[in-house]
Structures are given as structure tokens and as C-alpha cells.
Image (tube, grey):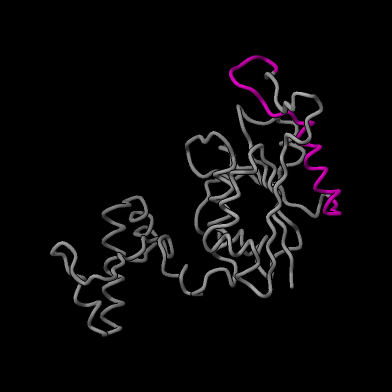
Amino acid sequence: MRVKKIWILTLFPEYFHAFQSCGVIGKALAGERSEELDLELKLINIRDFSDNNYKSVDDYPFGGGAGMVLRADVLQRALQSILEVGNYQREDLHVVFPSPRGKVWNNVWAREFADEYIGLHSCEKDLVFICGRYEGIDERFVEKYVDTHISLGDFILSGGELATMCILDSTLRFVEGILGNRSSHQEESFQDGLLEHPQYTKPRVFEDREVPSVLLSGHHKKMEEFKKTERLRLTQKYRPDLWERYHEGGKL
């Protein structure tokens, strides 16, 4: 069995407790989804590497400005602990920093990231995520140790924990064996640049609204045509930006 470790440097390890124990991702991290791949999430508390009795890990920025900055030396010691505990060389790890300067995350990148760093046929490197806090982290640590910046979008979070969980959740779904149905992610939103078709289940009538009859017909060709038409309709209605890119791609 292949083992892949994902290390998280954070000031709030408790953020990840539910992530590790709930849903399909929790089962994957508990080794219950694949007989070929053992995923291990390792939480490192940055505060454990403070060098003072107050356990402080930040300080005022040189040059002035609002907020506090995570210290480079504290982060370096936390990262060094991973190298020692895991018996790594620096090149054995790929360090990821969720931050506004990164390329914006999307479904295509999630699949590529899974293939490159987590899947059965990925590279040998293990992952490290740096969860920033406060005003940011010292640029000297960023320049020396961060390999990839990832942004969720043009908005600010209070820390990198939620961003890291979003990145991992969207990535792990592409790893073989994680989802029960191998075709699940192939029919979801953003595949082929479109939103997913609408979904229906029991009851067949809800507040005088019936399930579209074509989905009850058993006629597979007509059902597939209906789903495709609905994907186009919903994308044009709710995500005109996706619709425009899809149209420009010559797929209509």
C-alpha cells in the first residue's frame, strides 16, 4: 500500500478535527476508502515552536502597518520538525501556501493537483500546507520555503485553515477510490465548463411540482438529452461568465 502524508502547519489544529472524521473525506483520511492508498493528515501546531513563555508566534511589522505578522523563525522551526519526524530531505516535500497572490483554484487544477501530488501514480513528494493568520507571514519564509501559492478567489479569510480544507476536499475527490461511484465527479458542475444538470428524487410530487416526466420514462437517450439541455440552460441562466467561456470555446 502506498502512503501519502499531508502535513498542516496551523495555529488552530481543532479546525481539522471534523474534517478528519466526517463524510467521505473523513473516511478517506481514516484509510477506509482505498485498499491501495493510505492517506495520513498530520497536524502541527505552530505555537509549539514559539521561543518564549507566552507562546507568541507573531510580532509587529517592520515599517509600520496594521496587524501582526507570523515570524519566519517560528515557521522554520515548525517546518524543520516535519523534516526530522518524517525523515525527509527538503526536496521530499511540496509546500503550499493559500494566499491572495496565488493562481485562482478551480476544478481543472484540483484534478491536476490530485494526479501530481496525491493519487496512486503521483510523485513521491508529500504535501505541507502553511495556514497563515493575522496580517500574513514573513516574506523571507515565503521566498525560501513556499513552492506553490493557491488562491480561492478575490476575498479575504481570517486564516488559511478553511482554504486548506477546501483545496483538500476538492482535490481528494479526484483520487481513485475516494468516491464510491467512479463516475460521480464526471457529471458534476464545471466538468466540460458547464454547471451540473438539476437533480430530483422522491417524492414525485412536491408542492404541486412534479419530477420532469422524461426522467421517469426509462428512455436513456431522451434522459441524457434532457440533462445536457438543462446543463446548458442553467449555465446560461446562473453563470453567464461560464456560458461565455463555453461559447467562445466553440462547444456550441
Quadrant where the C terminus lies? bottom left
Query: For the view shown, which residue lies furthest in the bottom direction?
Result: 219
Residue 239: within the magenta?
Answer: no
Marker count (numbered): 0
Camera-side residue: 226 or 6?
6
At x 76%, y 52%, the residue is 93
Is residue 152 shown above or below 206? above
Query: For the view shown, which residue lies furthest in the top direction?
Result: 64
Residue 85: within the magenta?
Answer: yes
Q: Which residues are magenta?
A: 62-89
Camera-side residue: 172 or 16?
16
Quadrant where the N terminus lies? bottom right
Q: Position of residue 27 (x, y in %)?
A: 59, 64
Is residue 246 shown above or below 69? below
Q: Position of residue 232 (x, y in %)?
A: 29, 63
Q: Position of residue 148 (x, y in %)?
A: 66, 46
Query: For the view shown, which residue lies furthest in the left direction?
Result: 208
Q: Image check: 90 left or right of 8? A: right
At x 31%, y 70%, the residue is 228
Q: Position of residue 107 (x, y in %)?
A: 50, 58
Is residue 79 shown above or below 168? above
Is residue 101 shown above or below 251? above
Q: Image check: 191 left or right of 140? A: left
Q: Quadrant of residue 198?
A: bottom left
Camera-side residue: 110 or 251?
110
At x 27%, y 66%, the residue is 230
